[in-house]
Image (cartoon, grey):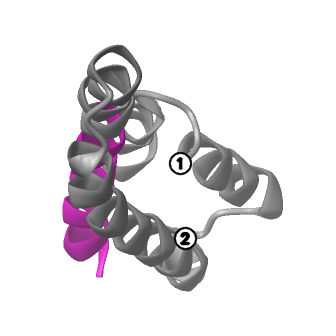
Amino acid sequence: MKSIFRIVSFLEGVSYLLLLFVAVPIKYFQGEESYVKLLGMPHGILFMLYIVLAIVIKKEMNWDNKTLGIVLLASILPFGTFYIDKKYLR
């Protein structure tokens, strides 16, 4: 389960960075919304999967509520999932 969470965490982080630093600037500077639509749905699915897996894996990893809160908070910060992978999952 840990390896699945690591993969989802990585993919969620990459999709978030692409959305923030590629798709959104293209939308606002060039008026092209297709990139946001293209990346938005996969990112949303990966985000929800990340949250669900973090809650499920809490017991396996022996995380307390504070650690779970940090893991969940990291999902909304750019580069946050990469930090979680390095600090809590390796």
Residue 4, relative to residue 79: is it above or below? below
Q: Which mark is residue 75?
A: 1
Q: Which residue is mark 2?
A: 51
Could you say where residue 28 lies in the image, as x and y percent from the top left?
A: 41, 22
Residue placed at 46% from the left, 28% from the top? 78
Residue placed at 80% from the left, 51% from the top? 66
- Which amino acid is tagged 2? Ile
Could you say where residue 14 lies in the image, as x and y percent from the top left?
A: 23, 41
Q: Dot 1 lies on which element?
A: loop
Could you say where residue 33 lies in the image, as x and y percent from the top left?
A: 31, 43
Could you say where residue 72 lies in the image, as x and y percent from the top left?
A: 63, 55
On the picture, is 68 further left or further right than 76? right
Q: Is residue 82 magenta?
A: no
Crowding around mark 1 (Cα neighbors within 10 Å: few <14, some 14 to 19, many 20+) is: many
- Which amino acid is tagged 1? Ser
Residue placed at 80% from the left, 62% from the top? 65
Residue placed at 34% from the left, 30% from the top? 27
Q: Dot 2 lies on which element?
A: helix
Do labels 1 and 2 touch, CB within 8 Å? yes
Q: Quadrant of the N terminus?
A: bottom left
Question: Residue 55, located in which quarter of the rendered image?
Answer: bottom right
User: How far is disc 1 from disc 2 in space, using C-alphas?
Assistant: 8 Å
Residue 77, relative to residue 51: is it above or below? above
Of residues 47 and 82, which is closer to you in this image? 47
Of residues 72 and 16, which is closer to you in this image? 16
Q: Which mark is residue 11?
A: none
Question: Residue 19, located in which quarter of the rendered image?
Answer: top left
> Bounds of the magenta span?
1-17
Question: Residue 17, located in which quarter of the rendered image?
Answer: top left
